[in-house]
Image (cartoon, rainbow, N blue to C red):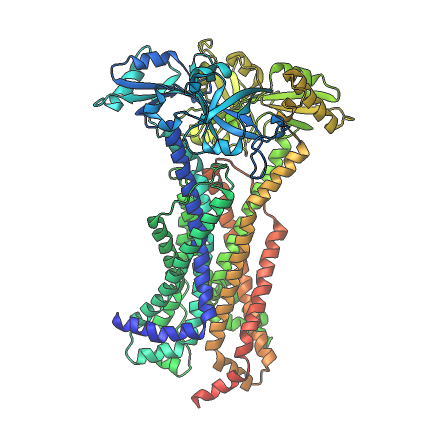
Amino acid sequence: MQTLFALLASFSWQELRNHPWRNAAAVVSVMLGVALAFAVHLINASALDEFAQAVRSVGGQPDLELRAATGSAGGIPDTLLGRMARHPDVALASPVLEISAYALGPTPTTDAPARAPSAKPGDAPRVLLRLVGVDALQVAAISPDLLALPGAGADRLDIFAPDTVFLNASARSRLAGDTLQLQWGMQLKTVRVAGSVRASGAPLAVMDIAAAQDLFGKPGRLTRLDLRLRAGVDRAAFVRAQLAAPDWPAQATLVEPGDTLERMSTLSRAYRVNLTVLALVALFTGGFLVFSVLALSVSRRAPQFALLGVLGLTGGQRLALVLLEAAVLGLVGSVLGIAMGTGLASLALRLLGGDLGGGFFAGGAPALQWSPLAALAFATLGLLAALVGAWWPARWTQGLPAAQTLKGLGTAQAPQSHVVLAAALLVAGGLLALLPPVWGVPLAAYASVGLILVGGIAGLPWLVGAVLDRVAPLVTRQALPLLAVERARRVRGSAAVAVSGVVASLSLAVALTVMVASFRHSVTQWLDTVLPASLYVRSSANASTQDTAYFDPAFVQAAARLPGVQRLASQRNTQFLPDPSQPAVTLIARPLGSMAGTTRSLPLTGEPLPVPAGQIGIYVSEAMVDLHGARPGTVYTPLLKHFQALAFDKYDGSATFFIAGVWRDYSRQFGTIAMEQADFQRLSGDSRVNDIAVWLEPDADVTVVEQALRALANAQAHTPGGEAGRLMDFGSAREIRATSLRIFDRSFAVTYWLQAVAIGIGLFGVAASFSAQVLARRKEFGLLVHLGLTRRQVLRVVATEGLAWTTLGAIAGLGLGLAVAVVLVHVVNPQSFHWTMELTLPGWRLLALGASVVVAGTLTAWLAGRAAAGRDAVLAVKEDW
C-alpha cells in the first residue's frame, strides 16, 4: 500500500498537473451531484424539523390526546372534559379548540406606521391564521408556549376577555395594528390584539376557549383534550380501559401526541424521496463522466502503466492505483459538494422557505438543520459514484499486456458480451417492478429502473454484434464503410464502452420526456372533465379553512337569480380521518347527476356500478383504493362515523355507503370521496358550500357577473366598503386550466435541465472514449495512410464508426428509455402519488432526441479522430522501425 501512495503522489500527480481541466470536470460532476442531493435533503429535513418544533410548541407535552375518531371538524363534546378531569388516573385535563381562519390586516412596513389610518381590512391580503382556544388556568402546565403574555398597557385578565387574541411572532410580522378581522363565512369578525405568545411556526393566535366557542358558534365542542396522567399509570392500559368502556362515545379516541407529526412525515415522504432520487440523477451521470475522464487518462498513459508492469507492479496494484485516483477525485468532489449543498440549502431556506414545490411546508423559513451523519452518507455516495465510474478503466489497466503495449501492438482485449447476464438483469428489473412499495415509497421500482439500465448497457456488445453482423454484407463493395463496420464489429466491447454513457443519459432523457408528456396529457384531459362551467367562485384556497370561509345557502340562491347566470352548481368540501396513521381524506359533496354515458361529471376510470336500492352511492379516488382498500362494489363503513361526528347526536347511523366507482383526482394525493350533495346535506345538516361553478348565458359578460357576485356578498354581509366582496376568488375555466398547466410546466422544468446535463455528459463520454481509442490506434491510422488513404478518408472511417456506434447507442437508449418510462408511469407514479395516467409517446420529440445524439456523437467522433489522423500518426509507424 505504501508503494501505491508513493505512486499516487508522483506518477498520478503528474497526470493531474498536466491535465487539470479534464480532472476538474470529473470533480465538478461529482460535486454537483452531491450538492443537489444534499441540498434537497437539508431543505426537507429542516422544514420537517421546523414543523415538529411547531407541533411540540402548540401541542405541548401531554401524555395523551383525546380527539375525534375521524378527525372531523365537529370535534368532541366538552362533556368529556368533566369525565377525564374526574378520572383518578388523570392528573390534568386541558381543553383545546383549534380553528383555522383567514385574518385580514395591513402588512407592516419599515418606513410607514404599523397601521395607516386610511387602510381598510379588505384591502390587505388574507393571512391563514391558526386560532387556538385554551383554558388559561390549565394550559401553562402542558403547553407553556401557549400561555398568553399581555402587551404593554394591557390588563393581565385580558386572556378571559371576549374577542381578544394573543399573536405569535409569525402572525405579528404579517398582521399589524391593535385589531384584526377574522373571516367567518362572508362576514368579518373584529378581535382585539392584547399581547403575544411564545409559540413558534406559522401564524397563530391564542384566545380564551369559551370566547372562541362563542365567536365561531361552537358551543359545547372541543377539538381535543390534552391529558397528563398521574405518575406510575400505564399509558397503554389506560387507553385500552377507556376505549373498552361501554359508555365511551364512538366519535372519540385516545392517541399519542406524536401522531400529527407522523402523519405529516407520511404526507410528504413520497414527495421528499422522489425529489432526492431526481437530484441523484446528476450524481448517476457524474459517474459516467468520471468513467470517461479516467478511460481517456489511462489510455494516454498505457505505455507508462505497461512500463510499471515490467518493473514489477502487478495487475491488481495497477487496478488499485486507478481506483485510488478515482477515490481522490470523488473525495474532493464530495467534500466540495457537501459545502456547496450546505450553501444552496441555506440560501434556499432564506429566500424560498422550506417548500420545494410540494406545498407541504409552505409559509415558513426554517433554520438550517445540518447533520454530520447525512453529510457523511451523501459524501459516501459521491465517492461510490466515482469508484463505480472508475471500475472499468481500472479493470482495463489490470489486464494491460505490458510487452505488446510497449511495442505499440495494442492494448487489452475488450471483454466478451455477457448476454445471459444482461438478460438476467432485465428480467430481474421487470420482476422488481411488480413488487409493492415499502413504507409508501417505490424502492423496488427504483431498483427495477437501475437493473434495466445496467442490464441494457451490459447487453450492448451483443446488440452491436447482432446489428453489424447483418450490416457488414451490405457494404462489402465499399472500402471505407467496410473498414469502419468491420472495425466496429470486431471490437464490439470497446464500442459498448464508448456509447454506454450516451445510452444511459439518453434512456433517462427519454424516460423523463415520456413521463412528463404522459402526465401533462392526462392532466389536460382531467381538467377538461372537471372544469365544465364558464366561471368558478371559491371562498377558501386552503383545506383547513373550509369550515370558516364558506357561502351560505342564501348567497347561493341569490347568485342563481343574477342576470347573466344560466345555472350554477355548488360544492362542499370537508375532511375526515378514516385511518389515524394516514393523512386526512377529503369528502366532496356536489350534484353528481347521471354517471352513465359520456356526460359524467367525474373522470371515472371505468364503468360505474349500479347502486343497490336503499344505499347511497359514493365515488372514491384511486388513492382511496390504494391507501384504504375502498374497492368498487363494497360498502365503505368509516363514512358512518364521520357523519355521526358532523351531525353530533342527530344522526342515527342507518345509512349504507356503496362504492359505485373510482375516479382520477390529480389535485388531492391521499384520497377523495365524492357523493351527492343532497345526501350530504340530509345526513349532516350542513348546507354550507365552498365552491360555486357558474354557467353563463351566451351573451353574458364575465366581468359584469363577477362584479354582481361581489356586490351581492357586500349587500348580504352589510359591508358597503366592499370587504366581503374581496373575500372571494374568481377564475374562468380557461384561466384555471392555463394556470394549472403553467404551474405543471414550472414544476417539471428541472427535468429538462437534467436531460440536457445527462446528454451532455454522455456526449463528453463519447468524446473521451473515442479520443482514448484513436490515441491507442495512431499506428493503425498511420498504416492506413502509408497504404494510400488520405487524411480525409481516415476521418471518414472514424466518423462512420462514430455514426454506427452512436446510432446503435441511440436505438438502445430509446428502447431502454421506453422501458424505464413504463416503470415510471405505471409503477413509480401510482405507488408514490396514488394516481394513474395513460402512457403518451411524444414521437417527434423522441426522434429529435435520438437524431441529435446521433449527429452530435458522429461529429464528436470526427473531431476526436482529427488529431490521430495527422502527421503524428504517420510518424508513429516509424516508432518500431
Most extreme residue toward the right is 699
| Residue 815 seen in render | no
327 versus 167 height, above or below: below
Residue 689 picture location, percent across and down: 58, 20
Relative to 396, 474 lies left or right: right
- Residue 837 image position (x, y, % from top left): 54, 38
Quarter that holds the N terminus: bottom left
Which quadrant of the figure contains the C terminus? bottom left
Picture quadrant where residue 473 is located: bottom right
Residue 176 rendering spot, x and y as whole percentages: 54, 30
Depth order, front residue of 546/765: 546
Height in image: 320 above or below 375? Answer: below
Who's the residue at 42% across and 68% down the image? Answer: 294
Residues 296 and 146: in front is: 146
Q: Is residue 516 left or right of residue 292?
A: right
Q: How many marks?
A: 0
